[in-house]
Image (spheres, helix red, strand yellow):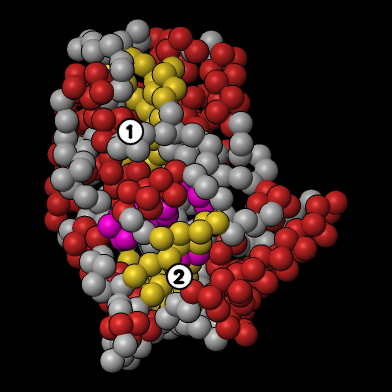
Amino acid sequence: MSLVADLPPLICVVVTSAELGGAERMLVDLLQGIPPSRFRFHVVLPRLGRLALELDQLHVSYEVLSFGGNLSKAGRSGVKAKAALGAVLDVVRYLWLYTRLVVRVKPRLVYTHGLKAELLTGIASHWLRLPVVWHLHTFVPKDAWLGRLHRYLQRRTRMLVANSKAVSAGVLPPASSKTKVVYCGVDIKAFLPLSKSAAEESLHLTPDASKLRVGMVSVLAPWKGLDVFLRAVQPLLRADARWQAMIVGDPIYDTAGHQGYDGVLKQLACDLEIADRVVFLPYQQRPAAAYACLDIFVHAAKKPEPFGRVIAEAMCMQRAVIATAGGGAIEQIESGVDGLLVAMDDVGALRAQVARLMADATLRHQLGLAARSKVLRQGSMAQFIERMATVLDDAMGTRPPRAGHSNTETRHRAA
């Protein structure tokens, strides 16, 4: 038998973002956790970024295959008319180069993360005839033509993995043995409750036992509701000098309207006259300290959150969590028991719940304890990694899928 035949199967991972959002951090967890004796991975990036730095540390091979300028800027709502031709040319160019890459690398499976990666690999699967697994971290597009194309290409995949039941509800066929729900894992060793003063020092904040903080850890994007958060807390901060707001994160998306959004938020804080009461920190590669600095964690998404990894992490860190009621958030939080849920894009509702927690330290403590307890009950990162490895095995045919199990839910660290 040749040495090539003895090697573990090679999986080509195609991603849409080169930075580290929730989907990419989940991928890093997976690549780190699966033993190299089981699978080999080769990652295709749209450009160099933080994800490439993580892959270097893991000694995972990768290469860059650019989407091109017009396709990179195209979002879920499509592309402007004057850039449409350029985007089409970018698609043709990408498909040609991707096909050549796959022929050269010879993977057993293509495994994708992100809408652009899903659509492009789905189109190419027509002639490459390789099994394709889409890991869905977002909802099926509502745009008419884009949604129809996505649903058509879903039928070409070998398997669909959704990060919540809310996301899985949008795939076709609605009850298929190839559709799996696998919730993201949270490493409870990495997200142990920390001393607040030690966390402040690690973030170069001046330790102050009298200072209380309410904040968000989030990708800086309009739909995440950071502007709603600032408007909600504005009168509360002005009324109580003990409290400070904190926003941790960077813009990571290349799509139009996302780059430079940190400047928009800082200007809003100035306009609301709370610039001196809001701390902006950049993306934290190890975010546990950021959560530990917060007394109240807020996730204010204006649209349903596909899963909300930061919610799970904040719960694991024993924080009192307020999240908007939609998508994966309602699969993680039982409102009033281990967190609080509020209506989306409702400044008044969010303000009322933040004020409630600001005034009640006992409730903050109770919700935090219940949140971490739920995370500890729900499984382990090792279980998440093994379930994902089983999905990849099934998709390659090394383990025959069990018939009759549609939309299979696997348990995770954060409910």
* Residue 405 visible, this angle: no
**Image point 55% across, 20% down: which residue?**
266
Amino acid type indicated by mark 2: Cys
- The residue wearing badge 2 is 12
Rendered location of residue 300, percent (x, y) = 45, 38
Query: Taking 347 as reference, is 138 above or below it?
Result: below
Where residue 42 sits, quadrant-wise, is bottom left
* Residue 185 visible, this angle: yes
Residue 307 covered by magenta stretch: no
Instruction: Judge from the rendering whether residue 374 lies leftward or rightward of residue 234; answer left or right.
Output: left
**Image point 34% across, 70% down: which residue?**
40
Query: Taking 17 as reference, is 168 above or below it?
Result: below
Rendered image: mark on residue 243 = none
Question: Quick check: marks 1 and 2 in contact, CB under 8 Å?
Answer: no
Rendered location of residue 174, percent (x, y) = 48, 79
Question: Which residue range is magenta in the image?
Answer: 12-32
Quadrant for the C terminus in the image: bottom left
Task: Assess disc 2: are there few (<14), some (14-19) or many (≥20) residues with their C-alpha within 10 Å of its C-alpha.
Answer: many
Q: 362 or 133, which is in the foreground?
A: 133
**Image point 55% across, 86% down: which residue?**
129
- The residue wearing badge 1 is 297
| SS under mark 2 | strand
Query: Taking 41 as reference, is 123 above or below it?
Result: below
Mark 1 or mark 2: whose residue is earlier in sequence: 2
Quadrant for the N terminus in the image: bottom left
Residue 25 covered by magenta stretch: yes
